[in-house]
Amino acid sequence: MGIIKHILEDKKRVAVPKVIDDTMEFHEITSLEQLSEGAFGILEPIVNNPVSENPEWNSSNLMIVPGLVFDKTGNRIGYGGGYYDRYIHKYSDRIGLKIAFAYDFQVFEHVDIESFDEKIDGIITDE
């Protein structure tokens, strides 16, 4: 939550994900008050402002991608739903840099992936 607050205070644009059935969509928010607790206690947008339909959201953005483990070539294993992989695949031309935040112990030399898994561009660790 701290990073979203900081980005909003810097007057930058923020979009956060919401999952409905098996589809994830990012919605632009302008304040933390536009978030509400959803499934599993995860905050999600209460606004309906999908960025996939907004031409102003182009490939100059940054996506923070979650994951359980990563490797040094950009492979990642997520939480098993495939939401980010499907979104990245569908909107690859509209996504700029894809990074993950991880603890150093989550990064390995090699992670086996599936054919549908999408790579990330970099990892920021605690080390």
Image (cartoon, rainbow, N blue to C red):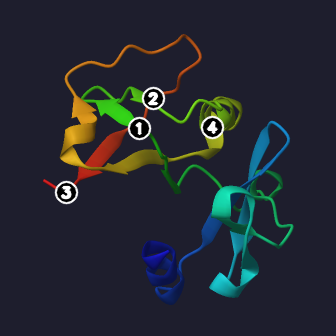
How far separated are the C-alphas under marks 4 and 2? 22 Å
Q: The disc labelled 4 sits on which kind of residue?
A: Asp
Across and down, in percent, residue 124 comes to: 27, 52
Q: Earlier in the sequence, mark 4 or mark 1?
A: 1
Q: Quadrant of residue 17?
A: bottom right
Residue at numbered disc 4: 93
Tag 3 secondary structure: loop
Residue at numbered disc 2: 77
Q: Can the viewer see residue 102 in this picture?
A: yes
Task: Locate residue 62 relative to residue 50 in the image: left or right.
Answer: left
Q: Residue at x 82, y 66 (%)?
A: 49
How many numbered dots are placed on residues in this image?
A: 4
Residue at numbered disc 3: 126
Q: Earlier in the sequence, mark 1 or mark 3?
A: 1
Q: Are marks 2 and 1 in contact (CB under 8 Å)?
A: yes
Q: The disc labelled 2 sits on which kind of residue?
A: Ile
Q: Can the viewer see residue 31 in this picture?
A: no
How far separated are the C-alphas under marks 2 and 1? 6 Å
Mark in front: 1 vs 3: 1
Q: Are marks 4 and 1 in contact (CB under 8 Å)?
A: no
User: Local crowd at mark 3 within 10 Å, few (<14), some, or many (≥20)?
Assistant: few
